[in-house]
Image (cartoon, rainbow, N blue to C red):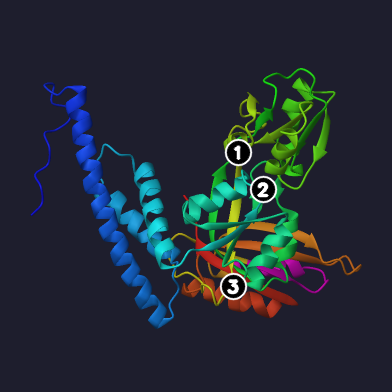
Amino acid sequence: MTAPDPTPPNDPSHSLSDLRTQIDSLDQRLLDLLNQRARVAEQVGEVKKREGTPFFRPDRVAQVIAKMQQSNSGPLKDLHVSAIWREIMSACLALESPQRVAVLGPEGTFCEQAAVEYFGGAADLIYCASFDEVFHATAAGSAQYGVVGVENSTEGVVTRSLDLFLHSPAHVVGEVSLLVRHHLLRTVNSLDGVEAVLAHPQALAQCQTWLSKHLPNAERRAVSSNAEGARLAAENPAWAALSGDRAATRFGLHIVAHAVQDDSYNRTRFAVICLPQTLAMPPATGRDCTSLVVSVPNRPGAVHDLLVPLKANKVSMTRFESRPARTGQWEYYFYIDLDGHPSQPNVAAALAELRTLCAFYKVLGAYPVTA
């Protein structure tokens, strides 16, 4: 029999001690229910083992969170409901089968933050020195999933990631759009005496106006990741780093200046990748993106012809980037994002027509679009 709900906490007759007693009681009930959920999740894991179905289903996670948000009557905000249930599901999934996820290291990167936002805090993170290593770990199976940066709202695409997608067997199954705030971190809580600022090249570019104004004489030194810059800055008081809150906490650094990026709405988009045998293309949700890379014969009008099937089938193109094919013949690969999913008839028809026009054609993935 379910215990009756305690007296509403806004009852003016309650003392602080009474309210804390109520919270302690509710916490215990929550823990009991969470353990009940965990035991059911373990049974689900056994069924998945017998059936050979994937343990991690991002579409299922999204469905559960959406259902909880729809039934939420407050005062919790939907954003907080999402965060709480993602962590609950992550912890339960870890009982079924811990998810190994490759990210750019060391600890404290925005890539790590994106992975935690997508998989929850119970994921088993594998830290890599570069996006090349993230792709390799995912393709080799030492990690089930990888998270890589693909685009920044200020500096554009992450070209190395695009190049790696070209020949990798991994495909995209999800994305995370992260609001990126770069702080100036240092062992000394002052701007005085900064000889060098260390960060990933994209972060240095995203903060160039602030750096030119406040630290015009400091060397700008590119490193493999912002967290690596923070790790190095922790070893030298004359150095500073551009990184986030996680790196400041991880390496015990002062935030000397907050949010120094030139664009206050600076966002980075991360792709979640895996082998098709780990997780097949997610089903359509109604808000999806299809990513592909193509090349066309080097002839007049070839690029224009790529757009014709899209227009004819009323498919919107949301991104179009070119990268040199490195053949020495002035040929290019084109990276295209389309609004929709290949299971939709109009998208399927556009892709079929598009393929006939291409010398090279590869679907990189189809996945739900983040809000």
**Amino acid type shown at disc 1:** Arg
Magenta range is 292-311
Q: Residue furthest right?
A: 328
Residue that numbered label 3 is attached to: 275
Against 70, residue 249 (above or below) is above
- Mark 1 near mark 2, Cβ–Cβ under 8 Å? yes
The residue positioned 70% from the left and 37% from the top of the image is: 230
Against 284, residue 213 (above or below) is above
Whole-angstrom CA distance, mark 3 to mark 2, is 24 Å
Q: Quadrant of residue 45?
A: bottom left
Earlier in the chain: of badge 1 and badge 2, it is 2
Q: Position of residue 174 (x, y in %)?
A: 53, 61
The answer to which of 228 and 370 lies nearer the viewer is 228
SS of the residue under disc 2: loop
The residue positioned 54% from the left and 53% from the top of the image is: 115
User: Which of the image's four quarters has the N terminus?
Assistant: bottom left
Whole-angstrom CA distance, mark 1 to mark 3, is 31 Å
Residue that numbered label 1 is attached to: 250
The residue positioned 73% from the left and 19% from the top of the image is: 191
SS of the residue under disc 3: loop
Against 364, residue 6 (above or below) is above
The image's mark for residue 106 is: 2
**Amino acid type shown at disc 2:** Pro
